[in-house]
Amino acid sequence: MSAFRCGTVALAGRPNTGKSSLLNRMVGQKLAIVSAKAQTTRHRVTGILTTDDCQYLFVDLPGYQTRHAGALNRALNRAATEGARDADVTVFVVEALRCLPADRAVLERIPVSQTVVAAVNKVDLVANQRELLPFVERLQGLRAFAAIVPVSARTGRNVPELLRVLRGHLPEAPAAYPEDQLTDRDERFFAAEILREKIFRALGEELPYRCDVQIDQFRLEGALRRIEATIWVERDSQKAILIGRAGEKLKAISSAARRDMETLYGGRVYLGTWVKVRRDWTHDARALRQLGYG
C-alpha cells in the first residue's frame, strides 16, 4: 500500500474562474461563498478532504484584484500571492478558452520554483470540445506546468483525475486534521460569509465592494443559534440602498442568509442585522485589521 500523503493545495487565479466552486466540489460541501462578482472571496478558507491515502488541505485564495484599488485590494493581493507561494502545490484555475492578461498576471506572481497544476475549468460550457486542445497547447507555452487538467466544477467532470494528479505532488506525511473535519474555520466565520454572499448576490455592481460583515454576537441558546451582525458600508447613501424601502431589501437579504445558515448548522437560527457607516473603511488600514484583513 502506498504511503499516506498530506499537504496544502492553493487555488489561484483571477476573479470569476470558479476557484471557490472547485473547492466546494472537491470537498463535497459548500464552504466557500460564490457569486458572479469579483472579490467575493476575501478570506482564506481551507477545505479539507480526507481519503484512504491522502489528506488534501485546499486553500481558496482571493482572486488577484486589478479593478478596485485601495488598501483592501492590496491586502487581498498580498494574501493571494503569499498563499500561492507557500503551498505544497498551486492549482492555477483558468476558464476554458479564456486566458486573459489578468490570468497571465496571476501566473507571473507565482514563483518559478513552485509546482503548478493548471485546472482548465468550465469545460462543460464549451460547445465544440475540439477547441480545447489548441487552448491547452497555448497554455503550455506560458509555463512549465506539472500537468494541465480540464475540469468542470459545476458537473464534477474530471475532478477525480485532478485529485489523482495533485496527490502525486504532496509530501508523505500523516493527516493534519481528523478525517471527519471539513474546514479550519468556525461557525462564526461562516455566518459572516453567508451574509456577505447574499449581499453580493442581491446588490448592484459597485456597492458590494464597499460592504463587509462583522459578527457581534454568536450564542447558543439550547437548539437556537442567536446571531447579531453588523454590515459596514462607507456612505449614508449606500446604507439607504442596502436597507431598501421600508427595510425590504435588508429583510430579504437577512432571510436568505438565515435559511442558508440553518441548512449549514442543522438547526434554528435567529439573525439580527444592522447597517452602519464607517467612512472609507476599504482605505483604512486600522479598520481592515479589525475586520480580519492582514
Image (cartoon, rainbow, N blue to C red):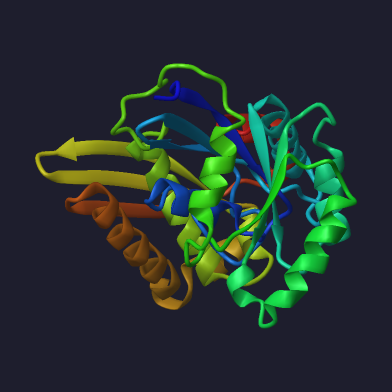
Q: Residue furthest bottom?
A: 127
In this picture, is 239 found above or below 12?
Answer: below
Q: Which residue is painted at 64% across and 35% down in the image? A: 288
**Location of residue 256 in the rendering, given as x and y in whole percent from the top left corner:** 35, 66
Q: Nearer the viewer, residue 210 or 52?
A: 52
Query: Would residue 94 appear left or right of 48 to someone viewing this image?
Result: right
Q: Is residue 32 visible?
A: no
**Location of residue 171 in the rendering, given as x and y in whole percent from the top left corner:** 56, 21
**Location of residue 60 in the rendering, given as x and y in whole percent from the top left corner:** 57, 42
In this picture, is 139 found above or below 84?
Answer: below
Q: Which residue is painted at 36% across and 37% down in the image? A: 182
Query: Would residue 227 appear left or right of 189 to someone viewing this image?
Result: left
Q: Residue furthest top?
A: 173
Q: Which residue is painted at 80% across and 46% down in the image? A: 106
- Numbered marks: total: 0
Quarter holding the N terminus?
top left
**Location of residue 261 in the rendering, given as x and y in whole percent from the top left corner:** 30, 53
Quarter holding the C terminus?
top right
Q: Nearer the viewer, residue 232 or 26?
A: 26
Query: Would residue 220 appear left or right of 71 to someone viewing this image?
Result: left
In this picture, is 12 found above or below 240?
Answer: above
Q: Residue furthest front?
A: 1
Query: Would residue 131 appear left or right of 235 to someone viewing this image?
Result: right
Q: Is residue 117 visible?
A: yes
Q: Which residue is painted at 70% across and 45% down in the image? A: 147
